[in-house]
Amino acid sequence: MVDQKTHQQAGLTPDGTVCARCGAVAEGAPPTWTCSVENGERRYFCDRCARDNIRAIEGRLDSSWW
């Protein structure tokens, strides 16, 4: 059985999606945002944070590292 996190735990709120790095909020689940799974928890990152840290993301480094 897969242990799926709820939308609230994943950074999705009734008001939108919250960036795990800078706290930016977007309506819904923006297709241009990055979703990362760290320690079994989904984290969403806005366009700016994802662009600024793309090499670390592609290297699968946890956001605490960058």
Image (tube, grey):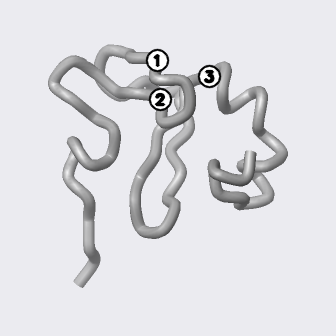
Q: Position of residue 11 (x, y in %)?
A: 33, 38
Residue holding disc 2: 19
Residue holding disc 1: 24
**Number of the front mark, 1 or 3:** 1
Report the side of 57 relative to 28 (left or right): right
The kind of residue on which mark 1 rests is Ala
Farthest residue to the bottom: give it.
1
The kind of residue on which mark 2 rests is Cys
Report the side of 58 relative to 6 (left or right): right
> Residue at horizontal 74%, vertical 27%?
51
**Number of the front mark, 2 or 3:** 2
Please state which of residues 2 and 20 is positioned toward the viewer in this rendering: 20
The kind of residue on which mark 3 rests is Asp
Q: Quadrant of residue 12?
A: top left
Image quadrant occupied by the N terminus:
bottom left
Residue holding disc 3: 47
Label 2 vs 3, first from the N-terminus? 2
Specify few, some or many for label 3: CA neighbours under 10 Å numbering under 14, 14-19, or 20 or more: some
Specify few, some or many for label 2: CA neighbours under 10 Å numbering under 14, 14-19, or 20 or more: many
Image quadrant occupied by the C terminus:
top right
Q: How many marks?
A: 3
